Image (cartoon, helix red, strand yellow):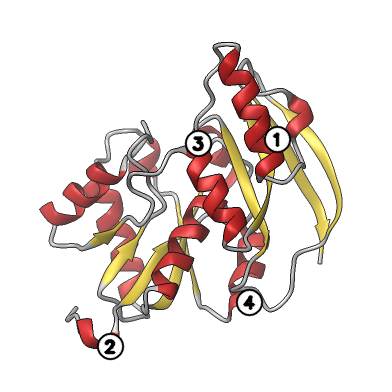
């Protein structure tokens, strides 16, 4: 996949519908690159176990439509579920699924340096080991700075999942912006440190969207480790 730096790169963005992947993608667009497609993993019935979030394929498809960008939905394979797959194996699988339909020069990820479950350096190294270029525009940013930059960029996102013992269930549905950052700061002062793995978000508006997403109805779902905001109707 050749790269033309003068004209910008064609980017396939790894995307779940949350603020990190969306901000990373917007940064690439603002830097003069083009998004060839977004790639999203669909975990099926066990989605929340693997991704700490409820399955929201329909909403992510709506994101793609609002952005005018093709979407590649990749089902979670059995070999991924078994936990033996390396980061490079998964990245190769995602890249192959995207390359079957679209041309791109690099993958883009919202991974950060502080992400224990796949940090930016690990993503780039894994990509390099299999000949894939991985762009990680959020490298070096902590959760508070990402919230600040996301809000400054005009991205609106709501909290849709929280880890029990880290964040109160009452934050579900509020916007992940300055108000939420203040909540994180208060918790930090109490010795409770919540990072990007302890909550999940859903983008509801963005400069890339033709129109915002309006949540019509929702309900709270709980399991032993987390509470989730399930979107039951939107437009």
Q: What residue sits right under mark 3 in the picture?
A: 196
Specify the quadrant of the image occupied by residue 166.
Answer: top right
Whichever of labels 3 and 2 marks the residue nearer the N terminus, that label is 2
Q: CA distance from mark 4 to mark 3?
A: 26 Å
Closest to the observer: 95 or 34? 34
Q: Residue furthest bottom?
A: 7
Whichever of labels 2 and 4 marks the residue nearer the N terminus, that label is 2
Q: What residue sits right under mark 4 in the picture?
A: 65
Q: What residue sits right under mark 1 in the picture?
A: 228
Q: Are marks 3 and 2 in contact (CB under 8 Å)?
A: no
**Residue 167 as seen in the image, left or right of residue 132:** right
Q: CA distance from mark 3 to mark 2?
A: 33 Å
User: In front of the other: label 3 or label 1?
Assistant: 3
Q: What residue sits right under mark 2 in the picture?
A: 7
Closest to the observer: 188 or 215? 188
Residue drawn at (61%, 62%), measured in percent from left and top? 60
**Residue 100 as seen in the image, left or right of residue 89:** right
Q: Are marks 1 and 4 in contact (CB under 8 Å)?
A: no
Residue drawn at (13%, 62%), measured in percent from left and top? 131
Label 4 Cα neighbours within 10 Å, binned few <14 / some 14-19 / many ≥20: some
Image quarter of the C terminus: bottom right
């Amino acid at each position: 996949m050749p790269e033309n730096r003068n004209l910008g790169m064609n980017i396939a963005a790894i995307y779940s519908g949350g603020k990190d992947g969306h901000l990373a993608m917007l940064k690439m667009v603002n830097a003069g690159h083009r998004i060839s497609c977004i790639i999203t993993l669909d975990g099926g019935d066990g989605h929340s176990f693997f991704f700490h979030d409820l399955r929201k394929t329909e909403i992510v498809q709506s994101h793609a439509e609002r952005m005018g960008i093709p979407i590649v939905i990749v089902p979670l394979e059995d070999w991924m579920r078994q936990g033996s797959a390396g980061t490079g194996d998964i990245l190769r699988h995602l890249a192959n699924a995207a390359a079957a339909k679209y041309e791109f020069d690099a993958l883009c990820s919202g991974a950060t340096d502080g992400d224990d479950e796949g940090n930016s350096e690990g993503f780039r190294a894994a990509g390099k080991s299999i000949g894939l270029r991985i762009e990680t525009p959020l490298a070096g940013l902590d959760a508070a700075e990402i919230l600040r930059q996301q809000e400054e960029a005009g991205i609106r996102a709501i909290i849709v999942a929280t880890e029990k013992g880290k964040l109160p269930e009452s934050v579900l549905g509020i916007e992940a912006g300055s108000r939420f950052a203040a909540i994180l700061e208060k918790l930090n002062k109490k010795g409770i440190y919540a990072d990007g793995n302890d909550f999940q978000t859903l983008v509801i508006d963005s400069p890339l969207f033709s129109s915002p997403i309006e949540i019509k109805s929702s309900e709270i779902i709980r399991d032993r480790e987390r509470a989730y905001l399930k979107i039951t109707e939107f437009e």
